[in-house]
Structures are given as C-alpha cells and as structure tokens.
Image: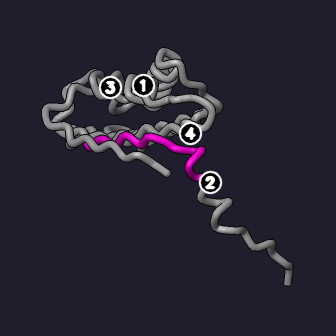
Amino acid sequence: MKNFQQVVPIQAAAIARQATGLHLIGDLYGCLCDSRLMLDASYLEAFCKARVAAAGLTSVGSLFHSFGEGGGVTGVVVLAESHLSIHTWPESGYVTLDVYVCNYSTNNRPKAQQLFQDIQAAFSPSDPHLHSVERA
C-alpha cells in the first residue's frame, strides 16, 4: 500500500479561498430559436466557441455530440477558466446551460455573465429558470 501525505485542513482552506468561482445554471424552457442550435452539433459547437471568444474567455477544447435525426445535442467547451456545458431537447423546447469560471488570478465573473446571457438570448426561452452559485 502506498503512503499518502496527509493534507493539513488550513492549507486546503487557504487554497479554496484563492480559487473562488461563479457557476451560472439555467433551465431554459419554451425555447424558440434557430433549429440548428437545438439539432446540429457542429453548428452549436461553432456558436458556443464564438460566444466564448466574444466574452474574452479561453477555449482549450470542446466535444459536441448529436443524438441523431430529431434528437438533441450535448456539448462542452473546456475553458482555461473552467467550462461551458449545454444540453438540448428539441422535442420539448428545453435546454440546460451551465457556465462555470474560476477567479484564481482575475475576476472572470463579468465574462461568465456575458457568455451566459449571450447564449441564453440565442435560445430565447419563454420560461428561464436561472441560478447563480458562488463557489469556494
């Protein structure tokens, strides 16, 4: 059995406070938008990456998957600052949207809020349920 070094709780708490973050969560109901956003993985990926860049965040990779004819899309853009994830249900006009950013070396909250608002606006939900969670 390997020996594991014990972490002192005070050190962990100090690190956690330095790596604060903002997690924006949306359940978007009644989306009336360009159908490509709901159905086309390549289109949604390009759209999300363009919005990430416009918000001033840094994409380091992405993966988007379409569930076939008439099915939705699930995707993630990995950010240097954390991530964006999105899932669509075109048959229900429903989208889940998460944007999470860390604020380790700079305050990325305004950038996260811009990204979230831009994507939400594109889906044009009639009944958005939005949550904001401060992390660490």
Please tell me how many numbered marks the rendered image carries.
4
Q: Judging from the image, what secondary structure is the residue with disc 4 in?
A: strand
Which range is magenta? 16-27
Mark 4 Cα shell of 10 Å, populated few (<14), some (14-19), many (≥20): some
Between the C-alphas of marks 3 and 1, the distance is: 10 Å
Kind of residue sitting beneath label 1: Pro
Between the C-alphas of marks 3 and 2, the distance is: 32 Å
Q: Is residue 8 left or right of residue 74?
A: right
Give the label on residue 110, or none. Answer: 1
- Give the percent coordinates (x, y) of residue 41: 46, 32
Mark 1 Cα shell of 10 Å, populated few (<14), some (14-19), many (≥20): few
- State which mark lies toward you, 4 or 1: 1
- State which mark lies toward you, 1 or 2: 2
- Give the percent coordinates (x, y) of residue 12: 64, 60
Q: Which residue is mark 4?
A: 82
Q: Which residue is mark 2?
A: 14
Q: Judging from the image, what secondary structure is the residue with disc 3 in?
A: helix
Mark 2 Cα shell of 10 Å, populated few (<14), some (14-19), many (≥20): few
Q: Are marks 3 and 2 in contact (CB under 8 Å)?
A: no
Q: Is residue 27 left or right of residue 18?
A: left
Q: Mark 3 or mark 2: which comes first in sequence?
A: 2
Between the C-alphas of marks 1 and 2, the distance is: 24 Å
Residue furthest to the bottom = 1
Q: Which residue is mark 3?
A: 117
Q: Judging from the image, what secondary structure is the residue with disc 2 in?
A: helix
User: What residue lies at 45% left-to-right and 20% top-to-bottom?
Assistant: 51
Q: Mark 2 or mark 4: which comes first in sequence?
A: 2
- State which mark lies toward you, 3 or 1: 1
